[in-house]
Amino acid sequence: MSMTNNYELYKVFYWAAKTGSLTQAAKALYLTQPSVSHAIKQLEDSFGITLFYRNSKGVSLTQEGVILYSYIEKSHILISLAEEKMAALKKLDSGELRIGGSDSLFKHYLLPYLEDYHQKYPGIKLHLNHGTTPETISFLKEGRIDVGVVRMPIVDDQLQVMRGIQLQDCFVAGSRYAELQGTVLSMELLLEYPIILFSRNSRVRMAITELFQSYGYEIKPEIEVGSVDLLIEFARKGLGISYVTREFVAKELEEGSLFEIQLDVKLPPSQVGFMIMRNMPLSNAAGKFIDLVK
Amino acid sequence: MSMTNNYELYKVFYWAAKTGSLTQAAKALYLTQPSVSHAIKQLEDSFGITLFYRNSKGVSLTQEGVILYSYIEKSHILISLAEEKMAALKKLDSGELRIGGSDSLFKHYLLPYLEDYHQKYPGIKLHLNHGTTPETISFLKEGRIDVGVVRMPIVDDQLQVMRGIQLQDCFVAGSRYAELQGTVLSMELLLEYPIILFSRNSRVRMAITELFQSYGYEIKPEIEVGSVDLLIEFARKGLGISYVTREFVAKELEEGSLFEIQLDVKLPPSQVGFMIMRNMPLSNAAGKFIDLVK
DNA sequence: GTTAGTCATAGACATGGTCTATAGCTCCTG
DNA sequence: CAGGAGCTATAGACCATGTCTATGACTAAC
């Protein structure tokens, strides 16, 4: 049988001990002096131990009261800290936002949002957790991230998905293949050239493979890389034709170090999506982030 | 404006988080599930932060809930320890008893009580604080000791004094003065011999000095010592006639290494008194001690 | 589909905390 | 020495708030 007093009594005890006066404690707690007197009496009765000496100038702790106070003071400090922390979390002066997704989306699409967010809420720690789409979904379900940023489509009824920007993938090449600039290639012809693709397990790779298959072709890359940066770099160096997201090579297209190769078929657009868990309350930090990107 | 929730809510939160179930928390707290549900809602509303995910198997903490729990758990542990400590103090499994008084009273009079007390309440730490009577009274008033054991009379209306045993002081000598055994001396004659007295600031010394003065004599010791043991030892060695408490030399009188010198006047008895502060609650430990010696 | 387990909500109820009023006490002051 | 200004304790009325019962909605498992 564990004794378990009303914790509220300890709050009263704390203030009475701290101020050395029931009257002062009452003021601190927005109560009247008899209420405090009563509360202290309850506590004393519950222990069967006198906690305060009452004298004409107020109260002072007995030996036992001092012992109790040594515990309650620490306890009170912890609770105060907790309350401050909660207020900070609420005001977004503190907290963390954990985002999952691919490095390329982080770098080429999310970065401005992240900068904006960080400027608005400098107290929030940002955790970027890169991984493949299935990994990101698992992380979300395990509660290891708050938001996932991946390519659509996502079909999972545990998740709530919001559309982000629409991206267009395309084939690009550097000056080595300058003769192709301005022409319109067929799939068949394109496959004569060395192709550089993103690694096998990515969404984009799967999509382009399926597209070619639906036309009866098999697209087999000469080079397979794991980052968008390498995709761009290799194309510039003339190692082949890269399949990249047009928006991610906007700068290179602009300055002419890369050019887009026109195909006679329309390449599928890809949609960025933000995923959060359905039916799970969003953390304040995550909620504000979603507001920002919408 | 410091937010200050009802601490009782944190107790509910603690159990809900610990058990991962509002229903289980309700059982632990001898409440119903709706009460717990309501309490948690209050807490969440007060912070404006969701603390738990509700699912069909119970509840689990959100990010923010985990943070809150990290504080509240520690706080709860402290309060539990405090309650255990209070229970221990009440049962006298723990605590301390601080007694002030003279070494001689501790050794020759209080020792059996202290042994008895220690056996009954082995958890109580005993502090013996030796000093003169005025010092002991000061210590008592400063709250540095719980009980004082001194010679009466004590006149101080801040103190409550209880009578202890009555002691009889007397003059004793060793075999060197064997010729005095069986005779009855006058004061005048006694003063012809070397006298050994306790140091100037003691009660006993003051009392005997006053007694001799009231008969027109001045008693001036050859030797002045600071402990009863030396008083006894010097008398045995034949260095003079010691004025000691008869009860403290019972063994020596019995075995014949000392004998009492009869005077033609009655020497004043001295009463041992226990002092405690009036109008101040006694600690449990001190209360039991007083019970024992009464 | 049924059952058994979650938690949430609504509304009635009553416990218990809070209040006002007053008394008793000590200390200080004119 | 009387009076005032502190302090805490006590008594009793009151009502707010915490608790209950009853019910609903939902999920998971059988």
Image (cartoon, coloured by chain):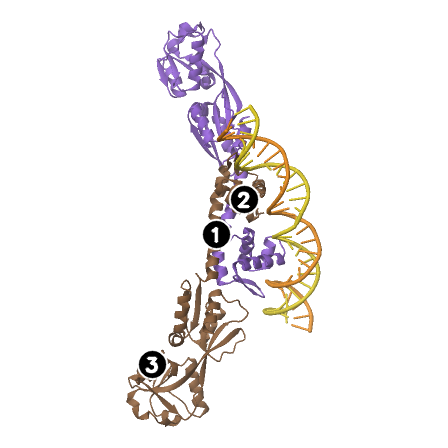
Chain colours: A brown, B purple, C orange, D yellow
Residue placed under numbered mark 1 in the picture? A80
Q: Secondary structure at mark 3?
A: helix
User: Mark 1 belongs to which subunit?
Assistant: A
Q: Residues within 10 Å of mark 2 (few under 14, many from 20)?
A: many
- CB atoms at circles 2 and 3 under 8 Å apart? no
Q: Secondary structure at mark 1?
A: helix
| Image spot of residue B42 (x, y percent) | 57, 57
Cα distance, mark 1 to mark 3? 52 Å
Nearer the camera: disc 2 or disc 1: 2
| Image spot of residue B294 (x, y percent) | 55, 26
Residue placed under numbered mark 3 in the picture? A251
Q: Quadrant of residue B90?
A: top right
Residue placed under numbered mark 2 in the picture? A26
| Image spot of residue A110 (x, y percent) | 41, 74
In the image, B74: left or right of A238? right
Compared with B264, A211 (above or below) is below
Looking at the picture, which amino acid does disc 1 mark? Ser
Looking at the picture, which amino acid does disc 2 mark? Ala
Cα distance, mark 2 to mark 3? 68 Å
Q: Residues within 10 Å of mark 3 (few under 14, many from 20)?
A: few
Cα distance, mark 2 to mark 1? 18 Å
Nearer the camera: disc 2 or disc 3: 2
In the image, B289 versus B40, the foreground residue is B40
Q: Secondary structure at mark 2?
A: helix
In the image, A222 versus B233, the foreground residue is A222
**Earlier-in-chain disc, 2 versus 3:** 2
